[in-house]
Amino acid sequence: MSDIVLKTVEYTVHNAIARVTLNRPEVHNAFNDVMIKELSVVFDEVEKNQDIRVVVLTGKGKSFCAGADLNWMKRVKDYSYDDNLKGSLKLADMFYKIYASPKPTIARVNGTAIGGGTGLVAVCDIAIASVKAKFSFSEVKLGLIPACISPYVMKKCGEGKCREFFLTGERLTAERAFNAGLVNAVVELEEIDKYVDELVSKLISSGPEAIKDCKELLRNVAEMSLEEAKKYTAEVIAKLRISNEGQEGMAAFLEKRKPKWDSDLGR
C-alpha cells in the first residue's frame, strides 16, 4: 500500500498484527465516503497479506466512531435514488469485507459507537469495550433505519433485542451492549490494551488456516439445514485432518511441543 495515501484511517502491521485506526478524532471518527473507501482498501490489503494473523480495529481519541459525518450527510441528503443506492452499496460492501475477512478481527471500542459505528463493532469477530463506551442505533431519530448494519447486529444480538434497540434508538451503556451480545467483554479503558493483547496472543497461537476455515464454517453453517450441515461439516474436518496445518497441529500436540505457526513467531 506504499502508493496509497490514507487520509481518514491509520494502518500499520507489526509482529503479525494489523492495527486499523479510524483517524478523524476532530469529528469523533465519523465516517464519510472517503473513510468507507479507505476501509475497503485496507481490508483488501489485509486479506492479501499472508503475514497478518490478527486485525485490531479502533478509533483515535475519545470516540470509537460517531456514525455518519454531518457534512457527508448534507451532500447525501440531496442525492438521487440511484446515487444513494450506489453509495449505500459501497457502505454495505465495506461492512461485509470486514465481516468476511479471513483474519480474526477485534474491535477495541475505546469510546462512543453510534449508528454505523455500532455496525463496525458488530462486523468484528470479538469486541472489547471500555466501561464508558456508549452505543446507539439512532437512525430512526433522523427518519432513517440501520439498514446496512442490520444483518450483522441481528446475528450478534438476535431479533428480539434489535426490535427494541432499532425502534427506540436509545443510548446503551457498555453493560447493556454486553448483556445483548454486541460486545464480548467490558473493561476499564486503562486495561483495554492488556485485554486485547491477551486475545491477540490466543488467536495467534491457533492455526491460521484453521482460523480462516472456522470463520467460513461459522458463516456457512448458520444458513444450512441440519441435513446440509451434516455432510458439509464432515467434509470440512476430513479435509483439515489431512492438510499440512492439520497434520502439523496434531503432531505437535502428540509430541508435546508448539506447532510451527506459533513457535516461528519467536514468542
Image (tube, rainbow, N blue to C red):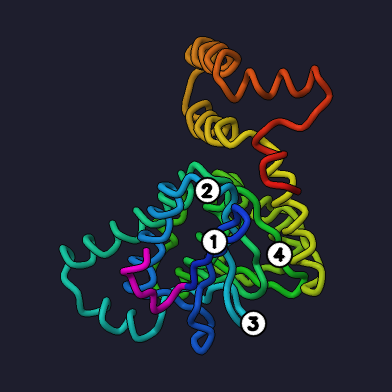
Q: Earlier in the sequence, mark 4 or mark 2?
A: 2
Question: Residue at coordinates 72% horizontally, 59% vertically from top-left?
Answer: 196
Q: Residues within 10 Å of mark 1 (few under 14, many from 20)?
A: some
Of the residues shown, which amino acid type is indicated by label 1? Answer: Val
Of callouts 1 and 3, the N-terminal one: 1
| Residue 135 image offset from top left, x and y in percent | 62, 68
On residue 51, the disc is: 2
User: What is the CA distance from the residue labelled 4 to the residue labelled 1?
Assistant: 22 Å
Residue 2: within the magenta? yes
Contact, CB < 8 Å: mark 2 with mark 1? yes
Asked whether, in this view, residue 84 is left or right of residue 29, the answer is left
Nearest the eye: 7 or 4: 4
Amino acid type for the residue under numbered disc 3: Lys
Q: Earlier in the sequence, mark 3 or mark 2?
A: 2
Q: Is residue 224 left or right of residue 104?
A: left
From the viewer's perspective, is residue 177 above or below residue 267?
below
Q: Are marks 3 and 2 in contact (CB under 8 Å)?
A: no
Instruction: Decide which of tag 2 and tag 1 comes sooner along the chain.
Output: 1
Q: Return the mark for residue 62.
A: 3
What range of the chain is rendered magenta?
A: 1-9
Task: Give the x, y percent position of residue 164.
Answer: 59, 57
The residue where tag 4 is placed is 129
- Amino acid type at circle 4 is Ala
Q: Main secondary structure of the magenta part?
A: loop
- Identity of the residue drawn at 59% across and 50% down: 54
Residue 111 position within the rendered picture, expressed as x and y whole percent measured from the top left: 65, 75
Residue corresponding to mark 1: 13
Which residue sits at x=65%, y=51%? Answer: 126
Q: Residues within 10 Å of mark 2 (few under 14, many from 20)?
A: some
Q: Inspect the magenta stretch and tell me whether residue 262 lies in it.
A: no
Q: Kindly state the secondary structure of the residue where label 4 is placed.
A: strand
